[in-house]
Structure formats: C-alpha cells, structure tokens
Image: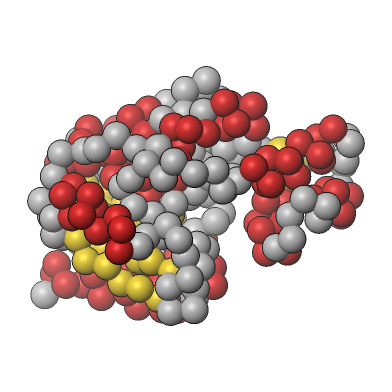
Amino acid sequence: MKLNTRAQTAQDPHNNSPIVLVHGLFGSLDNLGVLARELIASHDVLQVDMRNHGLSGRADEMNYPAMAQDLLDTLDDRQIEQATFIGHSMGGKAVMALTALAPERIDQLVAIDIAPVDYKVRRHDEIFAAINAVTAANATTRQQAAALMREHVADEGVIQFLLKSFADGQWRFNVPVLWEQYPHIVGWETVPAWDKPALFICGGNSPYVTEAYKEPLLAQFPQARAHVIAGAGHWVHAEKPEAVMRAIQRYLTEKTN
C-alpha cells in the first residue's frame, strides 16, 4: 500500500539522506511535525499516514510486516533508494520491522519510546471506549467529542491528540480494525540483527522502554544506543521536543563526522 504523504524539501540538503517520519497508534502525519520543522533545514522530510490512519488506505491486516511493506512501497513510489527513518511507538516498530524486509533501504534508524518486544498488555482500552462513545453519540464537533471523551480519558493531552484525527464528525482511523488487530499492534515478531547504529529515545517516566527489554533489544539491534529523557512520558517528542531534537541531531551528525 502506498501511503498518504506530506513531502518537504530541505533548505540545505548537504547530500543527506531523506528522513521519513512515522507516527504511532491513533496518530497521523501531523504528529511528528515538531521534528519535521527542525529537520527540514538539512534533510528532505517525508511524513506518512500509516494504513488505517489519516488519509491512507484501509485494510483488514494491521501487523508489522504489512506496515513495513507499506513503507517500502511508499519509498518505491517516490523513487527513494535509501532513507533515515524516525518512528514513534507503533511507527517505531514498523521501522524496526523494515530492517527485516529491506535492510539496505535504511540509512539510519531512530525509535522513539518503543522496544522490539511483545508487550502483552492493553494500554488503550479507555481510548477505544472514548472513541466509540463519540461515534455512538453522532458527535459532529470537536467540542462535543471532547466532552464525551472526558468521561473515559482523564488526560487532556491525550484527548487533544486524538481530536486531531476527528474531522467532519468522523474519525480518521479505522477503529474496528485497530480494535480487532490490537494484539498485533502491541505484539512483535523477532527480527534478525540489524548491524548498524540505531538510536532509541526513551521517556524517563514511560513504561515502554525499560531495563527488562534490554536483552531482546540488543539481540535485534546490537549497535543500539539508548537516550533517556528525564521527566517525559510516552509522548516524549511532544513533551520535550528540544531534548529529543538534540539527541536526533547528534545521532545524525555522528555518521558524517
């Protein structure tokens, strides 16, 4: 599946590889815009809507081999031979899955607050309940939707994040498939070792990347380096964008030095 994209041209590319930004569950190509605004100074930037999200196509399958194939199809469609991938959460796993499918197409890899493991835990049931409440009530405005969602979700930041994908009284993600395929989204199939430097950015307050996952992470990404950002949770790029950008820029420039 060729994904819906937003492409921006670098102000001063310096022969750098293009960067593909890949959002997480319930997101859209807008979600990593805070990174795109900085990266565009030196890299072409491609933001994508993942399948069953945003304006990309719908499909019954929602697993990481399929999502990785979507990324590859999108590279082929845009005639991009090699790119640097930065993915958050589900998007980070999709990028990691691409290392098994087409490792030669990846220049550098940044995974934001996600590990290559099967989490075996449901963290989004309240979000699904909130989304379904909005649909059941036939809400047409974001204000109506927000009021309904507050009955299920306490975090106002999460509500505002979700509302970015609510337009014209409709959710821009395929809720039934995301619910049905949720075990695949939190799950993981081990990939062969990808023997290039990779950066894993973690929120210090997040449960997604912990010492417990160090062994499987290094088995699959033996040259991985972790950068923990204190005081941040799972949406570390939204909470501490400057710290995240510093870590990314340092990683990107290490290759050229």
Q: Indicate left or right for 127 with 232 as reference.
A: right
Determine which quarter of the picture holds residue 201: bottom left
Q: Is residue 80 above or below residue 209?
A: above
Residue drawn at x 41%, y 45% is 119
For the residue pair 181 and 3, the one nearer the viewer reads as 181
Residue drawn at x 60%, y 46% is 124
- Image x and y of residue 253, in percent: 21, 72
For the residue pair 240 and 115, the one nearer the viewer reads as 115
- Report if residue 228 is visible in the image: yes
- Image x and y of residue 221, in percent: 18, 52
Q: Quadrant of the C terminus?
A: bottom left
Q: Indicate left or right for 95 with 35 as reference.
A: left
- Image x and y of residue 107, in percent: 19, 52
Q: Is residue 52 above or below residue 81?
A: above
Residue drawn at x 67%, y 46% is 127
Q: Quadrant of the N terminus?
A: top left
- Report if residue 14 is visible in the image: no
Residue drawn at x 43%, y 73% is 204
Q: Indicate left or right for 155 with 181 as reference.
A: right
Numbered circles on residues, count = 0
Q: Indicate left or right for 120 with 71 as reference.
A: right
Determine which quarter of the picture holds residue 80: top left
For the residue pair 198 and 180, the one nearer the viewer reads as 180
